[in-house]
Amino acid sequence: MANFAPEVSVVVPLLNEQDNIQPLYEQIKEALDGKSSYEIVFVDDGSTDDSINILSRLQKADARIRIIRFRKNFGQTAALSAGFTHARGKIIAAIDGDLQNDPADIPKMIDKLHEGYDVVSGWRKKRHDKALTRLLPSKIANWLIAKITGVKLHDFGCTLKAYRREVLAETKLYGEMHRFIPALASWSGARIAEVIVNHRPRTAGAAKYGLERIVKVILDLITVKFLLSFSTKPNQLFGGWGVLALFLGSTSAVAVILMKILRGTDMTGNPLLYLSILFFVVGIQFILMGLLAELLVRTYHESQNRPIYVIKEILESPAEER
C-alpha cells in the first residue's frame, strides 16, 4: 500500500467522536465502494475518549484507512491541514466526523469537480442546529465573508467540500482558515461551485464549537481580505491611509492658520492644531508601515523564490519548430 495512489482521499478530522466513527466509516464505504478507488484519512485531533482504539481496530481490518494522531488538540484547521498534506488522492474530500455531514453526498461533489471545477463546496440549506448559537451567527458570517471576499457561497463553514489536489497544494492553512479555502483558492483562479448537501442532526457526542468562534473567524477574515487584495502590494493599503491622514492634517493646519489670520484665534489653544499634529503623525506612521510591509513581502517572495502569479498551463510549439 506504500505506493497506492487512490482517485479519492476522504479526510475526516475528529475530536472525541467514539460513537460516530464506526457508522461514519460504514457510510463512507457504502458511498464510494465500486465508484472510485479511495482511502480514508482519519485525523485524531487529541481525542481523550476511545476514538483512537476504535480507529486502530478499523485500520487493521481495512488497509484503505490511514490514521494521523495528534499529541494534543490543535484545532480543526490543523487537523484538516495534516489530512490534506498526507492525502494521496487526486481528489480530496473533507467531511466532519460527527455524522452531521452525509457521506452519500461525496460522489455528487466529485461528479461536479469532473464538470471542470476545482473546488466544490457543500451548502447545508436545511440545517439542524440551534438557531441562536449556530444558525444566526453562521448566516451573518457567511454574508460577511461573501461580501468581503467576493466569493459567492452560501455556506463557507460547511466542512464537506471536494478539492482538486493541486488547489490545496497552493493553499497554506492556519488559524481558522479552513473555512476560507474557496476564497484563498479564488486568488489563483480556481473555479468554484456549490451543491446542496444533506445536513443531519447530531445524534451522539457533543458540539465542539460555540459563539466564541465568531471572534476568531472575524480576525481571520481580516487576514484573508488582506491576503486577497494586498499581499503583494501592502503599501497601497497602508500608504493610502497614510496619504489620507496627511491630507486631513494639512486641511486642519490650513484651517488653524486661516482662523488666526481672519479671526485672531490663538493657535496654541486651538484644538484643530492638535488634531492636525495627530493626523500628521498617524499619516507618517501608516506610510512607514507600508514601506516596511513592502520590504517584508519582497523578502518573503524572493527568499522562497515564490512567484506572485499562478500559471495554469503553458502552450508553445516544440523547440525544433521555433
Image (tube, grey):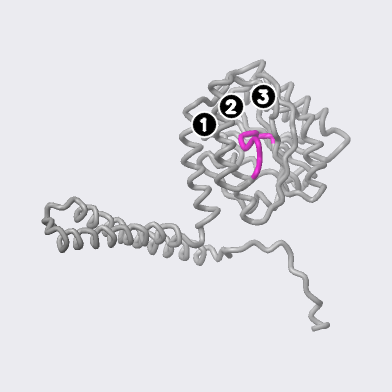
In the image, which residues are magenta? 152-160
Left or right: 136 as drawn, with respect to 270: right
Residue 226 appears in view: yes
Left or right: 74 as drawn, with respect to 119: left
Q: Which mark is residue 73?
A: 1
Q: Which element is circle 1 on?
A: loop
For the residues bearing labels 2 and 1, Cβ distance under 8 angstroms: yes
Q: Residue at x 84, y 40 (%)?
A: 36
Q: Which element is circle 2 on?
A: loop
Q: Which mark is residue 127?
A: 3
Q: Position of residue 228 (x, y in %)?
A: 55, 53
The quarter holding residue 15 reads top right
Q: Please name whichever residue, 182 or 169, is drawn nearer the observer in this view of the structure.
A: 182
Which one is in front in this view, the residue at disc 3 or the one at disc 1?
A: 3
Left or right: 238 as drawn, with respect to 285: right
- Give the mark nearer the N terminus: 2 vs 1: 2
Q: Which mark is residue 15?
A: 2
